[in-house]
């Protein structure tokens, strides 16, 4: 039997394997993800209600709202579901992460087998690619919001460059270096390149994310301070528009964990897990 035939057989057996019961860190992961999904859903619903319904007669809906909704829905996840015939209707990266937890994410190696690890790696890929698509959409929402109140060319060009960097890095980070794509979760089906490149790209993407997040947080100060409004109103607007610093904080906290992409033991239980090193041993 050829390697490709072995890979196809492994794939069929993996899809026939039932999910495992999440315990420990895997269960915590599911709970945390679901909590934030509920919070995000409530916030997005309120935003759409206010902008599209309460203010429907003022034509207040803008591109920033469209990109915010797109980042929440994440249409690419729907495309992946159709193309790969996965079970369920996944529309957000969080759902893929939860699905991965039911196939080994957050579980140590001694409680897993190759079949569930194949399924886990597949759902992790969908989650990460969808997340990579969501980031520039969120940035675009912030950029268009700031463009509404920004008239000076130097600030507008700063926003354009910031959005370009976020988009380019998302595309680069999402580039497939496995041929075919299925080799990400089943190495018997193809070949993959050196995973160290992915780690390097991850660090560069993190740096770009930190810089662009802080630009979004600091730029409102220079824009709002020249507006004709009282000092109290300016401070409130600066505070609201500067909340992008929170996203940067999360990116900074996550940066040290990129090293776990090269883990060799308990790969699915480390803070971050490589896709193509799952079967490296």
Image: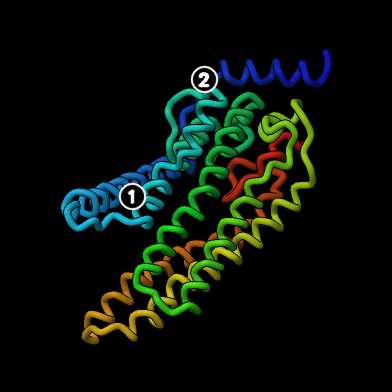
The quarter of the image holding the C terminus is: top right
Residue 23, above or below 240: above
Mark 2 = which residue?
A: 18
Residue 76 locus on image (x, y percent): 50, 38
Q: Earlier in the sequence, mark 2 or mark 1?
A: 2
The quarter of the image holding the N terminus is: top right
- Badge 1 marks a residue whose secondary structure is helix
| Rendered image coloring scheme | rainbow
User: How many numbered marks, from 0 up?
Assistant: 2
Taking the spot 43% from the left edge, 48% from the top edge, the residue there is 71
Observer-nearest of 104 and 160:
160
Q: Choose mark 2 or mark 1, whichever is in front.
A: 1
Residue 206, above or below 8: below
Which class describes the residues within 10 Å of circle 2: few (<14), some (14-19), or many (20+)?
few
Mark 1 = which residue?
A: 40
Observer-nearest of 88 and 29:
88
Which class describes the residues within 10 Å of circle 1: few (<14), some (14-19), or many (20+)?
few
Residue 233, above or below 160: below
Quadrant in the picture for residue 218: bottom left
Residue 243 locus on image (x, y percent): 37, 68
């Amino acid at each position: 039997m050829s390697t490709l035939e072995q890979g196809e057989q492994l794939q069929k057996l993996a899809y026939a394997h039932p999910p495992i019961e999440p315990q420990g860190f895997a269960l915590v992961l599911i709970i945390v993800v679901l909590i934030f999904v509920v919070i995000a859903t409530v916030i997005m619903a309120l935003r759409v209600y206010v902008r599209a319904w309460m203010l429907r007669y003022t034509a207040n809906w803008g591109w920033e709202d469209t990109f915010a909704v797109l980042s929440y829905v994440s249409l690419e996840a729907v495309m992946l579901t159709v193309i790969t015939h996965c079970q369920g209707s996944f529309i957000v990266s969080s759902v893929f992460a939860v699905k991965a937890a039911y196939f080994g994410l957050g579980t140590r190696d001694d409680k897993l087998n190759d079949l569930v690890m194949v399924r886990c790696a597949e759902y992790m890929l969908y989650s990460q690619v969808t997340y990579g698509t969501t980031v520039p959409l969120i940035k675009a929402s912030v950029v268009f919001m700031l463009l509404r109140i920004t008239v000076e060319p130097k600030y507008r060009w700063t926003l354009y460059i910031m959005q370009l960097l976020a988009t380019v890095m998302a595309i680069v980070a999402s580039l497939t270096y496995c041929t075919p794509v299925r080799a990400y979760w089943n190495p018997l089906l193809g070949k993959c390149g050196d995973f160290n490149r992915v780690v390097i790209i991850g660090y560069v993407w993190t740096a770009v994310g930190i810089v662009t997040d802080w630009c979004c947080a600091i730029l409102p100060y220079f824009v709002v301070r020249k507006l004709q409004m009282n000092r109290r109103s300016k401070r409130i607007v600066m505070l609201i528009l500067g909340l992008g610093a929170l996203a940067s904080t999360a990116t900074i906290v996550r940066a040290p964990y990129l090293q776990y992409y090269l883990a060799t033991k308990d790969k699915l239980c480390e803070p971050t897990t490589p896709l193509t090193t799952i079967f490296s041993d």
